[in-house]
């Protein structure tokens, strides 16, 4: 069984006609999972007009789960008190958290905390055997948020907080995080680069050509964590074959050597060939095949336990279709 954690409330942060994170991304995912027959509950956005051309899947159903608002103290597992206070203040005054791409509103802090709670709910479901695998479809995303800095649409680092939460709550010693968002997961790297208990692997467009400009191959971690950060940049135009070869030749062997007890995925779908924010050429099928390879590694090492957390994806049709393929591959 695969858990699906989301809430209509995630659209509340993404308000305003010029907001870079307009709420249609969540609406597209809710439409996609229902059009594909993965969920039977009513669409919370019936007036949203988007036909993804998806056919209902036979014998594939997701377990719907509700996110919860966690104790704000959980943010301190990764973030500094100064950052948390800064985000709270900037939300109260409807400010901008970085250099222009992360505007916030008075409701943004509450929704960002709920987004963290969505990741924790997915982790709880897997660790308590309610679901073998789970996916958190939440906004705002998180992998760019560093311990002391919000950036790149991200307020708090959902996946990093969830990883620390699992370690503290369930005694899991070793976690592998694979990030296939087209942009480097700089925030997740910063959270774990000196920690040998977390293997972080990021597949992303060459940082010389893409935001945020980090994620070079020579960035391999620091101190005791040296060797547990693996950055794999791809040239613009790279496609399914390029990614799948690297998954087989680099990613799976790294996971095999590390032998994690839980696999987590920063699932960004902006490496799709139809996405406007970068220049990688993955297909819907490419995301499914990558996911299947990662799930097979989890089956070998983690009793199949996978927690996947939404990051980017900015073409609504490509996002909706690719999320469905990702979910099907997790079943």
Image (spheres, grey):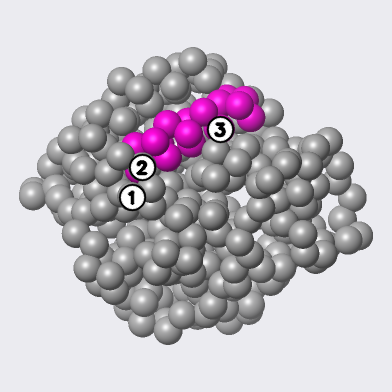
Give the image quarter of residue 164.
bottom left
The quadrant of the image that shows the C terminus is top right
Q: In this view, does 130 lie to the left or right of 110?
A: left
Q: Earlier in the sequence, mark 3 or mark 2?
A: 3
Vertical arrangement, residue 56 with respect to residue 140, above or below = above
Q: Which residue is disc 3 drawn over?
A: 288
Residue 8 in view, yes or no: yes
Mark in front: 3 vs 2: 2
The local secondary structure at tag 2 comes to: helix
User: Is residue 297 magenta-colored?
Assistant: yes
Tags 3 and 2 in contact by the CB under 8 Å rule? no
The quadrant of the image that shows the N terminus is bottom right
Give the image quarter of residue 58.
top right
In percent of width and height, residue 294 lies at 40, 37
Tags 1 and 2 in contact by the CB under 8 Å rule? yes
Q: Residue at x 55, y 59 (%)?
A: 3
Q: Residue 299 carries which label?
A: 2
- For the residue carrying disc 2, how many other residues have a C-alpha within 10 Å: few (<14), some (14-19), or many (20+)? some
Vertical arrangement, residue 291 with respect to residue 6, above or below = above
Q: Which residue is disc 1 drawn over?
A: 303
In percent of width and height, residue 249 lies at 30, 20
Q: Which residue is drawn at 26% across and 66% down?
A: 167
Q: Nearer the viewer, residue 255 or 49?
A: 255
In percent of width and height, residue 219 lies at 23, 36
In percent of width and height, residue 18 lies at 74, 55
Q: Which of marks 1 and 3 is nearer the N terminus?
A: 3
- For the residue carrying disc 1, how many other residues have a C-alpha within 10 Å: few (<14), some (14-19), or many (20+)? some
Q: Nearer the viewer, residue 331 or 15?
A: 331
């Amino acid at each position: 069984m695969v858990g699906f954690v989301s809430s209509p409330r995630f659209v509340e942060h993404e308000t305003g006609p010029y907001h870079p994170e307009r709420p249609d991304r969540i609406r597209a995912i809710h439409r996609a999972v229902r059009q594909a027959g993965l969920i039977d509950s009513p669409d919370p956005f019936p007036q949203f007009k988007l036909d993804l051309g998806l056919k209902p899947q036979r014998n594939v159903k997701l377990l719907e789960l509700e996110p919860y608002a966690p104790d704000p103290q959980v943010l301190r597992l990764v973030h500094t008190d100064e950052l948390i206070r800064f985000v709270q203040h900037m939300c109260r005054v409807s400010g901008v958290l970085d250099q222009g791409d992360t505007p916030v509103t008075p409701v943004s802090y509450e929704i960002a905390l709920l987004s963290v709670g969505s990741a924790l709910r997915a982790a709880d479901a897997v660790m308590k055997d309610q679901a073998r695998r789970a996916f958190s479809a939440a906004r705002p995303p998180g992998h760019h948020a560093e311990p002391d800095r919000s950036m790149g649409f991200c307020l708090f680092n959902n996946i990093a907080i969830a990883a620390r939460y699992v370690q503290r709550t369930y005694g899991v010693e070793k976690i592998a995080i694979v990030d296939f968002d087209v942009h480097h997961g700089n925030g997740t790297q910063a959270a774990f680069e000196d920690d040998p208990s977390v293997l972080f692997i990021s597949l992303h467009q060459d940082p010389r050509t893409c935001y945020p400009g980090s994620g070079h191959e020579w960035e391999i971690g620091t101190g005791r964590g040296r060797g547990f950060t693996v950055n794999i940049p791809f040239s613009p135009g790279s496609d399914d074959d390029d990614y799948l070869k690297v998954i087989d030749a680099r990613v799976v062997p790294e996971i095999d050597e590390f032998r994690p007890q839980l696999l987590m995925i920063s699932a960004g779908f902006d490496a799709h060939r139809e996405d406007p924010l970068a220049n990688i050429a993955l297909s819907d099928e490419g995301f499914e095949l990558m996911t299947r390879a990662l799930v097979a590694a989890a089956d070998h090492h983690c009793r199949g336990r996978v927690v996947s957390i939404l990051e980017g994806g900015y073409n609504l049709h490509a996002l909706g279709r690719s999320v469905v393929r990702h979910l099907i591959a997790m079943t």
